[in-house]
Amino acid sequence: MLVVIAAGMMACGNKHEHIAPAVRDSDSLPFMTAHGISNLISDSGLISYKIVAEDWNIYTTEPQEWTFLKGLFLEKFDTTFHVEWHVQADTAYCHDNRIWELRGRVVILNREGTLFKSEELFWDMDRHEMWSNLFMRIIKPDSQQELEGNRFRSNEEMTDYHITSSAGITPLNEEKKETPPTNKDAKQQADTAEPQPTQRSAAADSHRRQQQ
């Protein structure tokens, strides 16, 4: 009887408890939170981006993540510090300092003045590509042409893009209609017109010859 009790005590002592690892503060809380920021970010030693946001949360988890839960305005500069394009969104995330995810009312304006609107946009900073799997609308400023569709993909400058299931709208310029001349216009035409020679009747010419 004592042997059975001892065996039972040994079995309880070797029992493995399935306990999850402790939750650290860094798993759920940002390492740093900044409010009302306007920050310049460099790439390869050159200032390439400007970020304006109400809140900026930085997480040190792997992979590192930035969140902009109250909106984001971002500008991208070229090597001469001219703005290539700017984007604004209701919510933004930056994953591993490489992949940007923009949500909500996403609006992009490039250097050519072309306007892009969507509710989703991804941007790979390493591959210099942008894409979206939701509805996208493109408006060109010079001709007011509109192009819309799904599954958008573009280069980083937003100048070479492809959109599937697309449909476009091209406004047509109405021909100018000729308006009837006003009394003032008719008077001006009469004043500038050259005087026309008067026609003499055949009887007047005959009477003149007889007098000669």
Image (cartoon, rainbow, N blue to C red):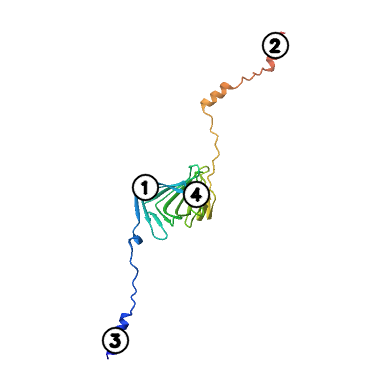
Which of discs 3 and 4 lies nearer the camera? The answer is 3
Whole-Å distance between the Cαs marked 1 and 4? 30 Å
Whole-Å distance between the Cαs marked 3 and 2? 161 Å
Q: Which residue is located at x 68 percent, y 14 percent? A: 204
Q: Which residue is mark 3?
A: 6
Q: Which residue is mark 1?
A: 37
Question: Marks 3 and 2: CB-CB under 8 Å?
Answer: no
Question: Marks 2 and 1: CB-CB under 8 Å?
Answer: no
Residue closest to the eye, 116 or 72: 72
Where is 206 relative to 51, above or below?
A: above
Give the SS element for disc 1. strand
Q: Can you give x and y, in whole percent of width and height, for residue 207 in the image? A: 70, 12
In the displayed structure image, the side of residue 173 where residue 56 appears, left or right: left
- Near mark 4 (Cα within 10 A), the count class, few <14, some 14-19 or many ≥20, is many
Q: Earlier in the sequence, mark 3 or mark 1?
A: 3
Question: Marks 3 and 1: CB-CB under 8 Å?
Answer: no
Q: Which mark is residue 208?
A: 2
Residue closest to the eye, 160 or 183: 160
Q: Earlier in the sequence, mark 1 or mark 4?
A: 1
Which of discs 2 and 4 lies nearer the camera? The answer is 4
Residue type beneath disc 3: Ala
Quarter residue 13 falls in = bottom left
Residue type beneath disc 2: Arg
Q: Which mark is residue 138?
A: 4
